[in-house]
Amino acid sequence: MTATPAYDAARVHRRTVLTLVVAQAVGAIGITIGIATASLLAREVSGSEGQAGLAQTTQVLGAAVAAYGLGRVMATRGRRFGQVAGLLVGASGAALAVVAGVVVSMPLLLVGTGLLGFTSAANAAARYAATDLAPTETRARSLSLVVWATTVGAVVGPNLSGVSGAMARRLGIPELTGPFALAAVGMVAAALIIAVFMRPDPLLFARGLAGVADVAPTGTSWGRATSALRADPALAAAVLGLASAHAVMVSVMIMTPLHMEHGGAELRVIGFVISGHVLGMFAFSPLMGWLVDRCGRPAMLFAGAGVQLLSLLLAGGSPEGSSWQISVGLFLLGLGWSAATVAASATIADRAPLEASTDVQGVADMTMWLTAAGGGALSGVIVASWGYAALNGFGGLLAGGVVLAAVVTAAAPGGRGAPEKVEA
C-alpha cells in the first residue's frame, strides 16, 4: 500500500470518527437496555434474589475476555472487522437472553449475558479506533467524542424499556425479554453502520502511511503487549490508571442504590442520582478531551484522581437515603472517571507501538474490566461488614493507582502527554 496524501488521511479520520460516533450511539442504546433489565430477568428466570447479580457479573467477565480477543483480531484484520465481530457476537448474546427467558433457563441466560460483554468490549475499543489517524494535538479530543456518544445510549436506552416490554407482549414472549430483543436490533444496526461506512479501515490505513501495511505482526498478541508494557513504564502506568479509575467508579456506584434504599429513598430518587452519575461519566467527555490535549495527560490524571477523591469524601460522609452529598458525590464520581479515563486512554493511544497498538489496548481494557469485576465483588462484602463509608475509603486506596499513573507519566520522556507513535 502506498502512502496517501495528508489531506486524504484527514478525510478518512473525520469519516471514521463520524461513523464511530453514530454507531456508538446506536450500539450503546442496545447495551444499556440490556444492563437496565439483566438483573430483573435473571431474578425472574432463576427465582432467586441471590442469583440476580450473576447476569451483570458474567457480562463484565465476558467483556474482559472479549477485550483481549478483539485486540488480537484487530491486530491482523483491522478495526472494522473487530468492531463488527464484537457487535454481532453481542447481538447473538442478546438473542440467547430472549430464548433463555422463553424456556426459563438460567445457564442459557448467563451464556447470553456473557456474550453481551462482547458489545461492551467493542464499544470500549471504539475510542481507540478514533485515534489511529488523529493528529497528535487533537488525539484526546477525537477519543473523547466517541466516549461522549455513549451518552445517547445511556440516556435513551433505559427509557425504551417500556416500549420494548410492549413489543414483547405483541410478540408473545416474556416482557422482560423485550429489552434484549430490541438490544439485538440495535447492535446489528451498529454493526452494519461500521461495516458499510468505516472504509478504509483506519488502523490499516495508518499502517500504510507508516510503511508497515504489509508486515504481519510477529509473536503472540500477549507477548507483543507485555513487551511494549515492559519497555515503557509510562505505558504500563497508564493501564494502571485506567483500571484504577474504573474500579473506583464501579465499586462505589453499584452499592449506592442499596445505601440510599436503606434510608428510605424512593426508586425515582435513586434513579435520578444514578442518572446524574452517568451524566458526569459521559456528557462532559469532549470537554475532558480538550483539557487533556491542552493541559496534558498527567495533569488530567491528577485532576481525575482529585475529583474522585472529593466524590468519595462526599458520598462516604452522606447519610442513608437521599441527600445533597450523595447526589453531588455520585456526579463527581462520574466526572472524575471521565477525566482519568480520557487521559489514560489517550496516553495508551500515544505510547503503544503501532504494530502492537491493538494488543496493548486489548490488554488494557481486559485489565480494566477484570479490576472492575474484582472491585464490584469486594464492594458488597465491604458494605456488609463495615458499611458504605468504609467502601468509599477502599475507593480512596484504589484512586492511589490513578495518582501513581500521573506521577510516572509526568516523569517519562514526552511526559506532558502526546509523543508520536513509535514503530515496534
Image (cartoon, helix red, strand yellow):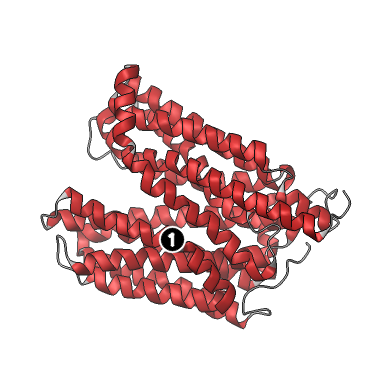
Residue depicted at 37% across the width and 44% down the height: 156
Q: Residue at x 38, y 42 (%)?
A: 157
Query: As drawn, which residue projects farthest toward the top?
Result: 172
Residue pictured at 42% horizontal, 56% vertical: 372
Q: Residue at x 33, y 59 (%)?
A: 277
Residue 281 horizontal side relative to residue 327, left or right: right
Asked if 158 appears above or below 237 in the picture, the reply is above
* Quadrant in which residue 238 is drawn: bottom right
Q: Is residue 46 left or right of residue 232?
A: left
- Tell me the quadrant of the picture where the C terminus can be found: bottom right
Q: How many marks?
A: 1
- Above or below, comparing residue 336 to residue 167 in the picture: below
Q: Considering depth in this image, is 380 or 283 the residue closer to the camera?
A: 283
Q: x, y (%) of residue 7?
A: 78, 58
From the top left corner, tell me how far across and down residue 108 is, in percent: 40, 27
Q: Is residue 409 visible?
A: yes
Question: Residue extending furthest left?
Answer: 264
User: What residue sits right under mark 1 in the picture?
Assistant: 246
Q: Position of residue 354 (x, y in %)?
A: 74, 59
Direction from residue 120 to residue 321 in the image, left or right = left
Task: Tell me: residue 202, above or below residue 116.
Answer: below
The three-letter code of the residue at mark 1 reads His
Q: Residue 183, located in which quarter of the rendered image?
A: top left
Instruction: Residue 314: give x, y in percent of width and height.
Output: 25, 72
Residue 402 located left or right of residue 423 = left
Residue 111 can be seen, yes or no:
no
